Amino acid sequence: MSAVAIRAHAPAFAPAPSWASNRFRLRTDRGEVLPLHVGRWFGEPEPVEAEVLACALSPVLDVGCGPARHSLALKRRGAAALGVDVAPSAVRIAEDRGVPVMHRSVFDPLPLEGQWGSALLFDGNVGIGGDPAALLGRIRALVRAGGRALVEVDPPGVPTQRLHVAIEIDGEKGPWFAWARVGADAVCCLAERTGFAMVELWTGEGRWFARLDAR
């Protein structure tokens, strides 16, 4: 594997909408309470996100797209992008924003299987299903030869682990579901196991992203 480049970025100064900043939390079955940056999901991509998106090869599959800010940014640049999400409310918002979106899981049948140029796993979505290796294996089956996955991971030193989590809104906890965390220092081995090679890491605003190219 070629040497991995790491890029650092100055902070972005546009704050997330304050109306969402304190309402949402992610509670783990290990007693942790993690923030959910819901306000950020409705904003413009941050500078570090924009640089990662610049590496996306069209067409782009935006996995766990939420309100689809990344698909919308790609659409404005003229790239073909499709959002996928299991939450009906997220799908409705994406549709209202004029973004092509499908209400289904990434593990369900999808169009263009084996032909996608890139897949996005931002905002912790590498944890979908609680099994990052299974998820990245599925992504590898979706992207074409020479395609890539652009993945947000946790900072170095954060344990890579499977969890059960629940979303809390104003202190009210929802049902438990399977999730996972992947640290930046573990993503290289995970990529190798699932048919990818890690090419680059970006960091900024305390966030970490990896570019994984399909072998």
Image (cartoon, helix red, strand yellow):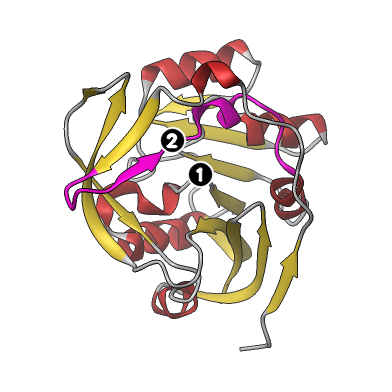
Give the CA distance from mark 2 to mark 1: 9 Å
Q: Residue 111 or 10: which is nearer the viewer?
A: 10
User: What residue is rendered at 43% in x and 75% in y?
Assistant: 186
Image quarter for residue 74?
A: top right
Q: Is residue 69 above or below residue 54?
A: above
Residue 27 is labelled as none
Whether residue 31 is in magenta: the answer is yes
Q: Amino acid at mark 2?
A: Leu
Quadrant into which the C terminus falls = bottom right
- CA neighbours of label 1 inside 10 A, class few (<14), some (14 to 19), many (20+): many
Where in the figure is residue 47, as x and y percent of width and height? 77, 46
Q: Residue 114 or 32: which is nearer the viewer?
A: 32
Q: How many marks?
A: 2
Q: Is residue 76 above or below residue 1?
A: above
User: What residue is rendered at 31% in x and 55% in y?
Assistant: 180
Specify whether 177 is left or right of 14.
left
Q: Secondary structure beneath disc 2?
A: loop
**Which residue lies under the disc numbered 1?**
123
Where in the figure is residue 134, as x and y percent of width and height? 31, 61
Q: Amino acid at mark 1?
A: Asp
Residue extending furthest toward the right: 77
Whether residue 39 is in magenta: the answer is yes
User: What residue is rendered at 60% in x and 24% in y?
Assistant: 42
Where in the figure is residue 179, as x and y percent of width and height? 28, 49
Q: Earlier in the sequence, mark 2 or mark 1?
A: 2
Magenta stretch in the rendered image: 28-46
Question: In this orientation, does residue 80 appear?
Answer: yes
Q: Is residue 41 above or below residue 54?
A: above
User: What residue is rendered at 68% in x and 64% in y?
Assistant: 202
